[in-house]
Amino acid sequence: MQEIIAPSFLAAPPTLLDANFQNAVIAVAVHESEGAMGFIISRQSNLTLYELLKDLSIEPKIPDQPVLYGGPVGKNSGFVLYEHTPGDPITSGFSLCDNISISPSRDLLEKAARGEMPGRFELVLGYAGWGPGQLESELLQGAWLHMPVFPEVVFDVPVTERWNHAFLQMGISPMRFVSVPGGAQA
């Protein structure tokens, strides 16, 4: 597959029955010969930011907020999804677009907890992972709707509406979606 897979979004078709990925929008951050890594941005976990910060002995100075369920792999691994000045991420990590990146940095989480971020952020627990060639194969089978990153979906759309909104950005109603071998189509 020659197309660029990361950074991008994947939206699970309504026909996907795997509970880990039903109604998921995944921000694919990494795609290499060794595999791919992404983060579900359309599902909240059962934890709040304050609960996690307390476990990490970090004193928050910001309002509490839900934590995202990023995927079934590394459920105890945390990542900060954040806005920054265009072209200038705060720390190392993965860029999703010009002004949104994701990083596993604890220093970044501490900065966010102190209210010192230049924009909005969300804490993500876990990630979705694919082995070598696995994501390419799933895309060829039509298992996902592959689309560009829509920055407004990340912070401007409520978590529970992101899946539907991603489809609408592509001009597709999820309820009219048909999955066919060789590519997802509506």
Image: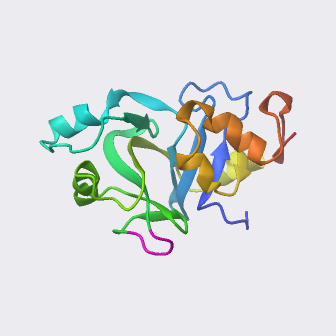
54 over 10 or under it: above or below: above
User: Which of the 4 image quarters holds residue 2?
Assistant: bottom right
Q: Position of residue 123 (x, y in %)?
A: 37, 44
Name the residue nearer the viewer: 21 or 95.
95
Is 146 on the left or on the right of 111, as rendered? right
Q: Position of residue 184 (x, y in %)?
A: 81, 43
Q: Position of residue 55 (x, y in %)?
A: 16, 36
Question: Which region shows up in magenta?
Answer: 85-89
What residue is at 15 percent from the left and 43 percent from the top? 59
Q: Is residue 25 magenta?
A: no
* Quadrant of the frame with the C terminus: top right
* Quadrant of the frame with the N terminus: bottom right
User: Which of the 4 image quarters holds residue 107?
Assistant: bottom left
Is 57 on the left or on the right of 113, as rendered? left
Looking at this view, name the residue that lies furthest to the left: 57
What residue is at 30 percent from the left and 38 percent from the top? 63
